[in-house]
Image (cartoon, rainbow, N blue to C red):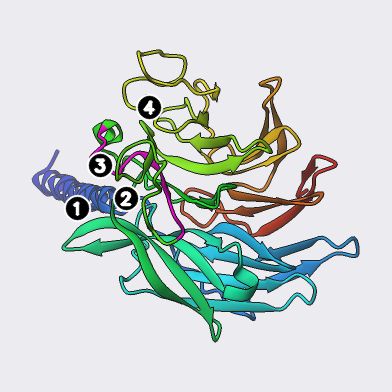
Amino acid sequence: MNKTIYLSLLGIIFLGGLVFALNTGQDNNELQDQENQDPFQQEAVEVTEETVEVVASDDGSINANNLFIPWTINKSGNNFFLSQRDGSVIQIDGDLGLVEVQDVEVSEDILHEGQGGFLGFTLAPDFNTSKMAFAYHTYQEDGEILNRIISMSLKNNIWTEEDVLLEGIPGGEINTGGRIQIGPDEMLYATTGDTGQAEKAQELDSLAGKILRMELNGEVPEDNPFDNSYIYSFGHRNPQGLAWDYEGNLYSSEHGESGHDEINLIKAGQNYGWPVIEGDEEASDMIEPIHHSGDDTWAPSGMAFNDGQLFVASLAGSNIFTYDIASSEVSEFFGDAGRLRDIMIEDEALFTITNNHDDRGEPSEKDDRLIQIPLTEKASTD
């Protein structure tokens, strides 16, 4: 081989190696950027009166498209109130199909980060006259992520904070709980997660990993199981659903760590085991779930009771399943819509909402959606 050809080959090899090294460094940087990204970061979708599409059918059913991570379904008369995790409420007139996007004004900025944000939202029993509601939202104080429960009033199309019922509830990017409901005893119940610190669920001096119970004015009820404490039950990982049967028994849905998602029958003062036990495991003075998912993952969220059955919305499971309380049988009721966050049942209709914009789903052109399903038959969106 002559010298010229030899040197040319060396040059080509050198340049090829340099390009390879540069590309490898770029790939590594891109991988590092991906690892540093917030895994729960959402690409915001602006929701306005013009962008929400309301579809009313001749049979009286109503559906709505183009929402953004709705978290709860409320209804007063024929008006829906859907809270969105970024900090707004969508009012939909079920008769006329009119839409109002209502701002939320609070004294501590809503922190829409990770699984936090404007979460639980429920109308007061006398909403028609008082225009009052209750909300659970995430905020930040001195660099710490926390949650709070507040009362709010609707004035001039804006939800405004009235009173702080409870603040300083532990928060984080995961396992935030966030469901609030008013029980048949006219008490306000709230679910809190362990925020990724499992040991807190067993500590009665922490509000993490608990189901809380309070008066509608924020006071601790005298008949709560622990003196001067909001704690109603403990040992929970991430409960996100509450429902009562006709006899006043309370049930909750709860996320397991890896599978073992739970349905629990909640009794005052009881310990539901996390992180000591899960699934079929047993321990002294700890309560096992009435049903769990085994190795499957449901990620159950909102739930409702009707005619002997619990209807449970699941996120990872992407369906609504039913749990028959008498027979303990589980059946799939509705699927094909992706991640489902909440359920409301009224008369012979079930309403649910999708959460496909939360960066764990695959949003369609219509997501996120409010969907009405007849209770008399199983249904799909096909």
Q: Residues within 10 Å of mark 3 (few under 14, many from 20)?
A: some
Crowding around mark 1 (Cα neighbors within 10 Å: few <14, some 14 to 19, many 20+) is few
Measuring 48% from the left and 55% from the top, which residue is drawn there? Answer: 358
Q: To which residue does mark 4 refer?
A: 271
Q: Disc 2 versus disc 3: distance between alpha carbons?
A: 18 Å
Viewer-nearest of labels 2 and 3?
Answer: 3
Q: Is residue 121 magenta?
A: no
- Specify start and end residues of the magenta stretch as a single range: 203-216
Image spot of residue 18 (x, y percent): 16, 50
Question: What amino acid is found at the position of numbered circle 2 in the picture?
Answer: Glu
Q: Does residue 266 appear in this view?
A: yes
Q: Which residue is mark 1?
A: 22
Q: Earlier in the sequence, mark 3 or mark 1?
A: 1
N-term mark: 2 or 4:
2
Identify the residue under disc 2. Answer: 173
CB-based contact (under 8 Å), mark 4 and mark 3: no
Whether residue 204 sits left or right of residue 98 in the image: it is: left
- Mark 3 residue type: Ser
Q: What's under tag 1, amino acid-wise?
A: Leu
Q: Are marks 4 and 1 in contact (CB under 8 Å)?
A: no
Mark 4 / mark 1, whichever is N-terminal:
1
